[in-house]
Image (cartoon, grey):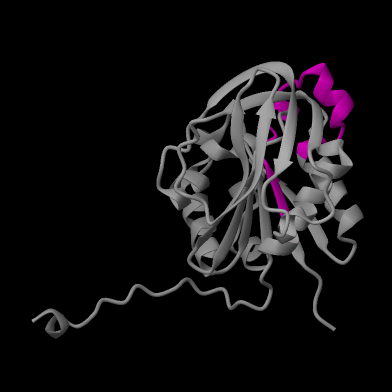
Amino acid sequence: MSRPLQVTVWNEAVHEASGRPASMATDYPDGIHGAIADGLRELLPQAQVRTAVLADPEHGLTEEVLAGTDVLLWWGHVAHDQVSDEVVERVHRHVLGGMGLLVLHSGHFSKIFIKLLGSTCSLMWRNEAERELVWTVNPTHPIAAGLPHPIVIPHQEMYGELFDIPEPDDLIFISSFAGGEVFRSGVTFHRGRGRIFYFSPGDQEYPVYQQPEIRRVLANGVEWAAQPDVPRVAPAVDHPPREWFA
C-alpha cells in the first residue's frame, strides 16, 4: 500500500494576527489556511494535511517539513516582502526537485512564484465584489474533473489581463467578470521536476474557499501536482564539453 500524500498549506496569516475584517472572522474562523486544509481533508481523506504560517519559526517551512511535503499550497497577500529569502531558496530547490506547488490568489506576487516564472507576474485588479465566472477551457485536464461549467463565484476581487507570466504549459480556466474583463485564472507550469498550478479565485474578503467547486479544484490540483515517487533531487545543470563547439 502506498503512503498517504503529504500536503502543507501555507498562509501569511497577517490579517488573522493583526485584527482581521469582520468578513474573515465569519467566513474563515480558523484562517484561510484552515479553510483550505479542511476542504482538502474532506475531499482527499487519504492525505495528511498540515498548515504553516509566516510567524512560525522559518515560516513553518523547514528543511524537514519540505522534505516530507508532496504538495505545498501558498496563499499570500500583503506580506510577500516579509518572507525570508533563505526560505524562498529552500522552497525553490524542492520544487525543482519534484515537490508540487499550488500558488493561490495574490500569491502571484510571492517571491517564490516570481522566481520560478522569471517574470513580474503583475496583473490588473479591482475589488468591488463582482461576480466571477470560471470557465473550463481544457475539460480533459485532470484538474478540471468533476467541475461545473462555469463555476459561479457570487462576489470576488477582479483580476484582469495582462497577466505577465510566461506561456503556460496548460491553460485550464479563464475567468470573466461583471465589468467585462477576462483573466487566465487556472494555469500550470513545469519547473525542473516540479509541477506548479496557479489558481486565482480566493480573496480574503469573500468565502470563496468555502465553495465546494473551489475546494474540488484545489483537491484536483493537489492530486495532479503530487509526485510522491519522484526522488527529491533538483536536475543537474550539465555543461557540454568545450570540444563539442570546436
Query: Is residue 69 something one can see in this rendering?
Result: no
| Residue 45 placement, left or right of 51 | right
Residue at left offset 52%, top offset 36%: 109
Identify which residue, 78 or 195, lies in the foreground.
195
Residue at the left extreme of this rendering: 246
Q: Is residue 127 left or right of residue 31?
A: left
Q: Quadrant of residue 176?
A: top right
Q: Position of residue 178 (x, y in %)?
A: 70, 19
Q: Report x, y in % for residue 97.
A: 53, 69
Where does the C terminus fall, quadrant-wise? bottom left
User: Where residue 164 sits: x, y (%)?
Assistant: 45, 37
Residue 195 magenta: no
Of residues 11 and 225, the one drawn nearer to the viewer in this rendering? 225
At 67% from the left and 53% from the top, the residue drawn is 138
Residue nearer the viewer, 238 or 58: 238
- Above or below, 51 relative to 245: above
Magenta segment boundaries in residue numbering: 7-32
Please say whether residue 234 is visible from this viewpoint.
Answer: yes
Q: Residue at x 71, y 26 (%)?
A: 15
